[in-house]
Amino acid sequence: MTIAVLGTGLAGLACAAVLREAGKDVVLFDKSRGYGGRVASRRRDSFAFDHGLPAFDPITTGMPPALTSLPQWSDYGRVAAPRMNALPRSLGESFESRMNTRITAIDAGTLDLTDEAGALHTGFSRIVVAIPAPQAQALLATHGEAFAPLDEATYSPCWTLMLGGTGEQTSIPNRIEPPDGPLALLIRDDAKPDHPAPSPCWVAHARKDWSITNLERDAGNVAQDLGAAFASLTGIDPSAAPYRAAHRWRFCRPERVVRHPFLLSDDTRIGACGDWCGADRNGGDALAAWRSGEALARIML
Ligand SMILES: Cc1cc2nc3c(=O)[nH]c(=O)nc-3n(C[C@H](O)[C@H](O)[C@H](O)COP(=O)(O)OP(=O)(O)OC[C@H]3O[C@@H](n4cnc5c(N)ncnc54)[C@H](O)[C@@H]3O)c2cc1C
């Protein structure tokens, strides 16, 4: 019998890898077209951006073996080349995968999955739900007390700005953390190792409070405002950039996590994992997601 893993972010992929290593058959599901979840990259024309996780936070010990071969980018951390989503893609592509498939219901008796088009996916002995807590709650709220802690997890949002083809400004560092203002972090993505873009590609993260206040605004207007903040910090005119866009992450980083490293139903057939779990956070939320996925897989074997 096969194990279904819902979500191909770091938690789902780490979980799937451990299960397969132990000889289990695994099928991946994701509502998106590509693997990686918040390890996300976008290509437009000749530009490329990591508009999700910019780099794996630097750590001295405890990096999972699957990530140790990633190139180091200055002292900012490890990055996948040519873009961050190359990592989840290479991990995910070796599994049978049903992408563009949002699961909307799990039958607690048969473990059949229903997707949003109404199609049924059957034949599973176990289900792993590796998606952000608020989305997991929608699937698991009726699956018993074991999943009640999902209520405890909260996330902060983040608007990200992408600018492709801005003018050169060599005196500006590749990574800037402004102390105040709408932007919390500016990263020059084309400075990352083996990045493919021939011209400057910047990604900027809005500060948490700014993202909360502006959460429901139109992306075009947000790009305009964040572009103005970018200009005042760098002296670079964003209106000259051929590519400018904003992306909203409603669930960007966990604010409050649950106490457990994963959640498991009483009959152990359904488990949930992700960055919202109380896994070891050395290496940030990204590695916490990874460890949570691995821990759930080990208990399910
Ligand atoms: C802008 C940004 C900056 C960040 N910076 C850092 C940082 O500096 N350091 C750090 O450690 N972390 C950072 N993070 C957080 C880090 O990226 C995440 O903690 C980690 O990637 C989460 O992995 P995950 O597997 O738990 O969830 P996700 O990556 O969210 O994966 C969940 C997957 O489930 C899929 N899915 C959801 N619902 C369904 C459904 N019903 N059916 C099927 N599929 C579904 C989604 O499409 C997604 O692919 C950042 C994130 C963002 C967005």
Image (cartoon, rainbow, N blue to C red):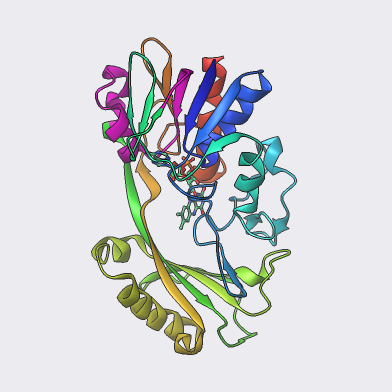
Give the image quarter of residue 131.
Answer: top left
Residue nearer the viewer, 137 or 68: 137
Q: Residue at x 37, y 33 (%)?
A: 119
Depth check: give the residue in front, 93 or 185: 93
Q: Position of residue 146 (x, y in %)?
A: 32, 19
Quadrant the C terminus occupies: top right
x and y, in percent, of residue 33 in the image? 50, 50
For residue 168, above or below residue 159: below
In the picture shown, does residue 155 fall above or below 258? below
x and y percentages locating residue 219 in the rendered image: 33, 70
Vertical order, 43 against 237 (above or below): above
Q: Is residue 276 left or right of residue 70?
A: left
- Please tell me which residue lies in front, 271 or 73: 271
Residue 252, relative to residue 44: is it above or below? above
* Residue 4 x/y as whole percent: 49, 26
Residue at x 59% of width, y 81% of height: 172
Single out the residue that lies furthest toward the top. 267
Res. 281 in view: no
At x 46%, y 77%, the residue is 244
Which one is in front, 194 or 5? 5
Which quarter shows the N terminus?
top right
State left or right for residue 228 relative to residue 163: left
Location of residue 168 by image quarter: bottom right
Drawn side of residue 280 relative to residue 277, left or right: right
For residue 247, which quarter of the picture? bottom left
Numbered range of the magenta stretch: 121-150
**Count of numbered marks:** 0
